[in-house]
């Protein structure tokens, strides 16, 4: 469970950093979707 929470916090941090760097909203949404899918796979497996 600690790994799942750690991974989720890491993805949130990466998403915030990418939102500051990337000017394109589509790329930000794509990164968010990828993080959600990866977190879901880690949580379910």
Image (spheres, rainbow, N blue to C red):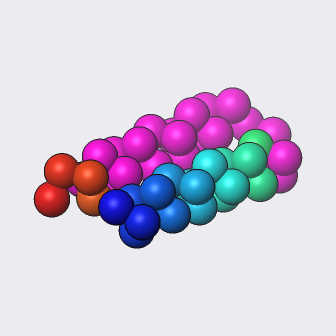
Labels in figure, total: 0
Kindly give the residue lying farthest to the bottom in the view shown: 3
| Residue 31 colored in magenta in the image | yes
Q: Residue at x 40, y 68 (%)?
A: 3
Note whether 13 is above or below 36 in the view shown: below
Question: Residue 28's x, y, as percent?
Answer: 64, 39
Q: Is residue 41 left or right of residue 5?
A: left
Q: Which residues are magenta?
A: 20-41
Majority secondary structure of the magenta segment?
helix
> Does any portion of residue 39 appear in the rendered image?
yes
Q: Residue at x 61, y 41 (%)?
A: 27
Q: Is residue 13 left or right of residue 41?
A: right
Q: Residue at x 54, y 46 (%)?
A: 31
Q: Is residue 10 left or right of residue 22?
A: left
Question: Residue 11's x, y, as percent?
Answer: 56, 55
Q: Quadrant of residue 33?
A: top left
- Quadrant in the picture for the C terminus: bottom left
Question: Residue 34's x, y, as percent?
Answer: 43, 48
Kindly give the residue lying farthest to the front in the view shown: 1
Note whether 8 is above or below 2 in the view shown: above
Question: Residue 39's x, y, as percent?
Answer: 37, 51
Q: Residue at x 29, y 46 (%)?
A: 40
- Quadrant in the picture for the N terminus: bottom left
Q: Is residue 28 left or right of residue 30?
A: right
> Does any portion of residue 22 appear in the rendered image?
no
Q: Quadrant of residue 38?
A: bottom left
């Amino acid at each position: 469970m600690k790994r799942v929470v750690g991974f989720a916090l890491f993805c949130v941090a990466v998403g915030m950093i990418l939102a500051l760097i990337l000017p394109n909203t589509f790329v930000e949404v794509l990164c968010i979707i990828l993080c959600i899918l990866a977190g879901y796979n880690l949580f379910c497996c």
